[in-house]
Image (cartoon, grey):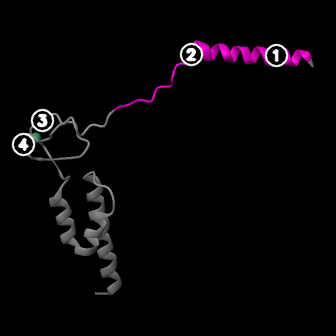
């Protein structure tokens, strides 16, 4: 077999392992390098490793970000991200008054010219 084909196939192994790695909620290029270094063995390793998250109830593998265990239906609270909505601070009466004063003064300045 041509060496180039072997290299291309090995890179494909890396890409496949990398995709599985990311689908499991992991970040970085760890899966890609496992596939590159170990080939089909790397893909198997990534698959066996799974998401790395285990359900506290049944110890089954759980996808990161899931709100419920697919095996036993236990609610996974820690997986959810906090929904902190940045709310704009309400404009105070003092600020509104200051803006009105500025507009008034600007208008007065225009008249004076
Ligand atoms: Zn479970």
- Taking 24 as reference, is 66 above or below it? above
Q: Kindly tell me whether mark 2's CB lies below 8 Å from ligand 1.
A: no
Reading the image, the residue beneath label 3 is 73
Residue 69 or residue 96, whichever sits in front: 96
Residue 94 showing in the rendered view? yes
Q: Which residue is mark 2?
A: 92
Mark 4 Cβ and ligand 1 under 8 Å apart: yes
Q: Are marks 4 and 3 in contact (CB under 8 Å)?
A: no
Residue 25 in the image, given as x and y percentages of width and height: 27, 51
Residue at the limit of the structure toward the bottom, as seen here: 2
Residue appearing at x 45%, y 30% in the figure: 86
Secondary structure, mark 3, is loop
Mark nearer the N terminus (4 vs 2)? 4
Q: Identify the residue under disc 4.
A: 58
Percent from the top left, x then y, of residue 29? 33, 63
- Can you tell which of label 2 and label 1 is closer to the viewer? 2
Q: Within the magenta stretch, is there residue 98?
A: yes
**Residue at the image point whose x is 59% and y is 12% from the top:** 93
Q: Is residue 25 magenta?
A: no
Q: Which of the marked residues, 1 or 3, is nearer the chain's N terminus?
A: 3
| SS for dot 4 | loop
* Stretch in magenta: 83-112
Q: Nearer the viewer, mark 4 or mark 3?
A: 4
Question: Which of disc 3 and disc 4 is earlier in sequence?
Answer: 4
Q: Residue at x 21, y 66 (%)?
A: 43
Asked whether the residues under the numbered discs 1 and 4 touch, taking CB atoms below 8 Å apart as contact, a structural biologist would say no
Left or right: residue 15 versus residue 72 is right
Q: Is residue 10 left or right of residue 103?
A: left
């Amino acid at each position: 077999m041509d060496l180039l084909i072997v290299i291309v196939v090995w890179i494909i192994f890396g890409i496949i392992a990398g995709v599985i790695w990311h689908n499991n909620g992991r970040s970085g290029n760890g899966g890609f390098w496992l596939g590159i270094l170990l080939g089909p063995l790397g893909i198997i390793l990534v698959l066996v490793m799974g998401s790395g998250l285990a359900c506290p109830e049944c110890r089954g593998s759980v996808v990161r970000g899931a709100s419920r265990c697919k095996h036993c239906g236990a609610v996974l609270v820690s997986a959810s991200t906090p929904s902190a909505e940045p709310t704009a601070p309400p404009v105070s009466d003092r600020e509104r008054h200051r803006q009105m004063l500025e507009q008034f003064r600007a208008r007065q300045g225009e008249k004076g010219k």
